Amino acid sequence: MGYGVHRFTGAIDDNLICGVCGGVLEEAVLTPCGHSFCLQCLQTWLDNLNAGYTCPECRSRVRNGDARPILSVRNLIRGLEVSCEHSSRGCTAVLTLDSMISHMNICGYVPIQCSGCGETFNRDRIPEHREQCEASSVAAATAASRYPDSKGRRRGSGDSRVKIRNVLLVRLALPSGSHVRGQSVL
């Protein structure tokens, strides 16, 4: 499935649009008849029994494995500028599509969901939330009381609550279909 056209900062040439999904070509491939599609879109089309192994554009015969990657188009698209996936949450970063994955590892606007209270907030608010969230300190204290410390002693819930106050268990709260994989932040 292609990249959303709305994310790109400049105009997108019509030749870079997938004829199946209408997005900017993601992992562009070329059929023997000369049409280009997203790899996943073409595979999905060909796996559909009603399609009869034909090109989505001209209905020429195409089989799985017939399409070839278009490396120059893939590289061209990866060099186009896009807005961060989290611009709606406040991120103003504009970078190449190729550098988006590394940006997502540091973007302060990635939505995080606290496993203690369930609140969703921007990643850059973790320290602030850590100070305010009573549920996360209780959850951390309960978890800590189950495990021995480095000397093999189990901590009681009273003193572990104070010692573990700064522990916050969170998870990424990304929309489905996102290109970024979820991760745990401890």
Image: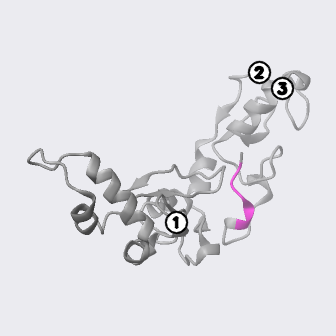
Contact check, label 2 and label 1, Cβ < 8 Å: no
Q: Split into 4 quadrants, where in the image is the N terminus?
A: top right
Q: Where is residue 9 in the image (x, y as percent from the top left)?
A: 66, 72
Dot 1 and dot 3 residues touching (CB under 8 Å) = no
Residue 186 seen in render: no
Indicate whether 120 appears above or below 3: below
Q: What residue type is labelled 1?
A: Val
Q: Whole-Å distance between the Cαs marked 2 and 1?
A: 40 Å
Amino acid type shown at disc 2: Arg
Residue 67 magenta: no
Residue 94, picture quadrant: bottom right
Q: Which of marks 1 and 3 is in front?
A: 1
As shown in the figure, which amino acid type bears the numbered disc 3?
Answer: Asn
Is residue 174 visible in the rendered image? The answer is: yes
Chain-order first, disc 1 or disc 3:
3
Instruction: Look at mark 1 in the image and give the residue it sits on.
Output: 110
* Badge 2 element: loop
Residues drawn in magenta: 2-6
Foreground: disc 3 or disc 2: 3
x and y, in percent, of residue 171 in the image: 48, 56
Mark earlier in primary sequence (2, 1): 2
Q: Are marks 3 and 2 in contact (CB under 8 Å)?
A: no
Q: Mark 2 points at which residue?
A: 63
- Does 5 lie within the magenta span? yes
Percent x, y for residue 39? Answer: 68, 37
Of 183 and 12, nearer the camera is 183
